[in-house]
Image: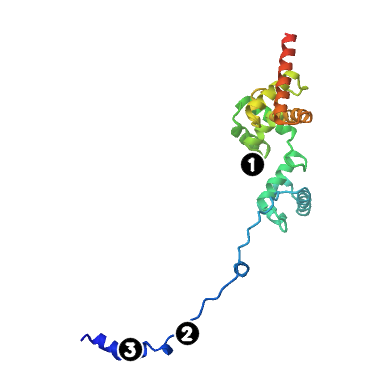
Amino acid sequence: MDPNLSLFLLYQPYFCSPQNFLPYMSLPMFEPQQIKAEVSVPAIPINQKYQRTWTKSELEEVFNSTIEYCQKYNKQIETLTISDFAVISMGKRQTPEQIMIKIKEVRANGTLRPGKWSEAEDSLLASLVQLHQSSWGRIAQVLNNEIHSKLNIRNSKTCKERWNNYLNPGINRASWTVSEDSLLLKGYLQYGNKWKSITKILPNRIEGAIKNRIKSLLHKMKRECKSEEELMKEIDNFCNEAEVKKQENI
């Protein structure tokens, strides 16, 4: 006989005895509300609100602190180094580099108004556009070297916007004509709110003015229309009438 089987038969009464089994215990039951309360859900982070690098009060405070520093140590603003601005920046939110660039910009512009262009900048920008055409990166580099002591105050985008929106002598600032309004509305029907595409229809008008004009025209038409379909018909009627007047003038 197998020795394992003989051992089992010998101790069978012990193994099969009820008192040698652990008592049955049912698992605890939880209500859904209890489970929901005990499970911790990680908090969803809230996006922080964008904070500007400079506020008006901060700019005035930093400028006044710089003036006081120069008077105390008998220095000129243009001779201040990063070490000087490290002292001025103590207790301020901005870094010494940020303060140095901002003070240099204020001195060059002659005003605390952020981003304002000086007459010297405008004059040089006009000359550089004639020389370098649309090489805005090169124009910004020369402008910073000549006006801002090689500090990166202006970039290619700001130079381009300044020229296209303010200094370009080819900009048409006259009142809007019926013919122009008709072209704008046709462009809106074709491109929607893609303002840059519509600007190509009237290149002598700046993009911001075109955007505002289209919104003004649509606002007036929407007040007299009850549906989108009626608005489209109103735009078509306006364009057709403008075309008729144009032919009559010819």
Disc 2 target residue: 23
Q: Return the disc, 1 or 3, that comes first in the chain's sequence.
A: 3
Front residue of 178 and 221: 221
Measured Cα–Cα span from mark 3 to mark 2: 20 Å
Circle 1 or circle 2, nearest the eye: 2
Q: Is residue 123 visible?
A: no
Identify whether 68 is placed above or below 173.
below
Q: Quadrant of residue 93?
A: bottom right
Q: What element carries label 2?
A: loop
Q: Distance between the residues labelled 1 and 2?
A: 81 Å
Q: Which residue is drawn at 66% across and 26% down?
A: 189
Q: Which of marks 1 and 3 is in front?
A: 3
Q: Does residue 249 lie above or below 181 as drawn?
A: above
- Type of amino acid under label 2: Pro
Residue that label 1 marks: 152
Q: Which residue is drawn at 63% across and 38% down?
A: 155
User: In 3D space, how far apart are the residues under numbered discs 1 and 3 (Cα atoms)?
Assistant: 93 Å
Rendering coords of residue 202 (x, y %): 67, 22
Residue 145 location in percent, x, y?
63, 37
Q: Quadrant of the N terminus?
A: bottom left
Q: At 29% across and 91% down in the image, what residue appears?
A: 10
